Amino acid sequence: MVASPVQVNERVRLRLDSLAVGGEAVGRHEGMAVFVSGGCPGDEVEVDITEVSRRFARGVVREVLTASRDRVEPLCRHFGDCGGCQIQHIGYPAQLRHKGAMVRDALERIGGLKNIHVPEVWGMEKPWGYRNRAEYRAQMNDSDGVELGFARHHSHDIVSLDECRVQHPISEAIRRSIIDLTSRIARSTGEWKMLLGVETLISFASGGGIATLICDGRPSFLESLVDALSENVPNLRGVLFARRRGQSPHRSPAEILVGDGYIVEGIGDKQYRVSSDSFFQTNPIQAARVVNLVEEWADVGPDDRVLDLYSGVGTFLLPLARRARRAWGVEDSASAARDAYGNARWWGVSGVRVYERRVERFLERWVDQRRTADIVVLDPPRKGCGPLVLGRVARLEPHRIVLVSCQPATLARDLKTLADLGYAMIGIQPIDMFPQTWHVETVVVCERSDGGRAG
């Protein structure tokens, strides 16, 4: 067995060359890849090694010897401690360049697609304050007060925030108000630990928002907090409550305590009702570009039958349904499916149906019934579609598939599967939905290699 060229706790000097999925910069030491937290491609750095495996090592920047020309001063003072953003220290034009390279590398290395031209990533004019949803976690501080923040890098510990520059200002106003109000009320009741977190959902279109209080049980201070919060935040349209046990990621459906349980958000000139429990695109400004591109590449005609899988509140489904003969959406979230039906009625779109089912089970039944579709749109979670879903999609014989992905590696695997099933990629466009983080959205369109249409 060949000895590793580096050991844990060793300090090495590296030239960092690229950015990896996860936001770490990558350099090489005696041929071994070293993934470096806090590094910027182009840096020369001294790195403390924290982890060594057979094929790679990890480390953290101890000292920047020569800074990359792309290195900038992070805008948020919590950067490097808070795990919400990973690449604020990289100038925005360079962020876009490296995200495009991540997509291209994944397609070539994982997808086996060679000589692929990946266009420049579509960025934002103002890459701050773009998030319409926040999920703050709660903890007690040393003064017996309640703090709200995000998890520390690679930890379950919470970083108490003074600010978050990527959240909508109303989310931050809600957070600050809850810290003040809850700290006082919690101290007087001794129930501070029952508040586990706060979720906010803000409408860029109306400037209003809702807040969901996540608790372990139902604390007695809840009603007092809700009343005070409603008075303190003028733009707050509703407050909700949900139960969660300990650190479980799952919570109960939200219960309205006061006001509305939803917002109305705009995507370009399109408006959608979005409930507290429903998934919706986090960045409505860039989401408008995604929706327009999906519409363009789907190229729906009046005789087409459209199937939108993982359809959410109807973000893609409804614009496509307006052009199609028939359209179906599939969504396993009861809340999102209800919103999609409500949005379809609101839009006055006929010939559309939403199934509240898991995509895998829905496709199994459609394949058994020998159903077909002309155009399929897929917007899966980060894990991607996988061979089972894509194999069943291919059995429906669509002539065109539009795939929206938020993870380059799973996108590459899905494209490889589609290529094996006879669907060739004919268009790709990365879009920066998540500035200051390593994440990148990508829209891809594939067509059947034989050029045929489903009959």
Image (cartoon, grey):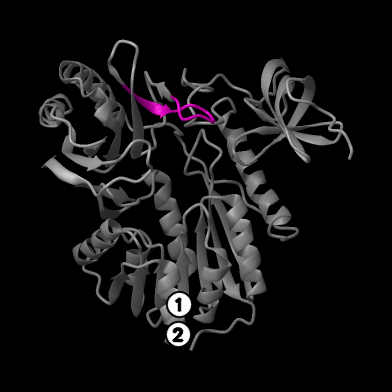
Residue 16 quadrant: top right
Q: Which mark is residue 424?
A: none
Front-most of 197 and 352? 197
Pinpoint residue 7: horizontal percent, then vertical percent: 78, 26
At 35% from the left and 30% from the top, the residue drawn is 137
User: Residue placed farthest to the right in the image?
Assistant: 2
User: Residue placed farthest to the top in the image?
Assistant: 143
Pinpoint residue 363: horizontal percent, then vertical percent: 44, 75
Alpha carbons under labels 1 and 2: distance apart:
6 Å
Answer with left or right where residue 86 lies relative to residue 144: right
Answer with left or right where residue 409 lies relative to residue 155: right
User: Mark 1 and 2 residues: CB-CB less than 8 Å, in contact?
Assistant: yes
Q: Name above or below for residue 151 compared with residue 100.
A: above
Say which amino acid is labelled 1.
Glu
Residue ID for mark 1: 364
At 31% from the left and 67% from the top, the residue drawn is 356
- Number of marks in the rendered image: 2
Neighbourhood count class around disc 2 (C-alpha, 10 Å): few under 14, some 14–19, many 20 upward = few
Pinpoint residue 59: horizontal percent, then vertical percent: 69, 26
Residue ID for mark 2: 368
Check residue 149 for magenta coloring.
yes
Say which amino acid is labelled 2.
Asp
Q: Which residues are magenta?
A: 147-157
Secondary element at image label 2: helix
Check residue 146 for magenta coloring.
no
At 56% from the left and 38% from the top, the residue drawn is 438
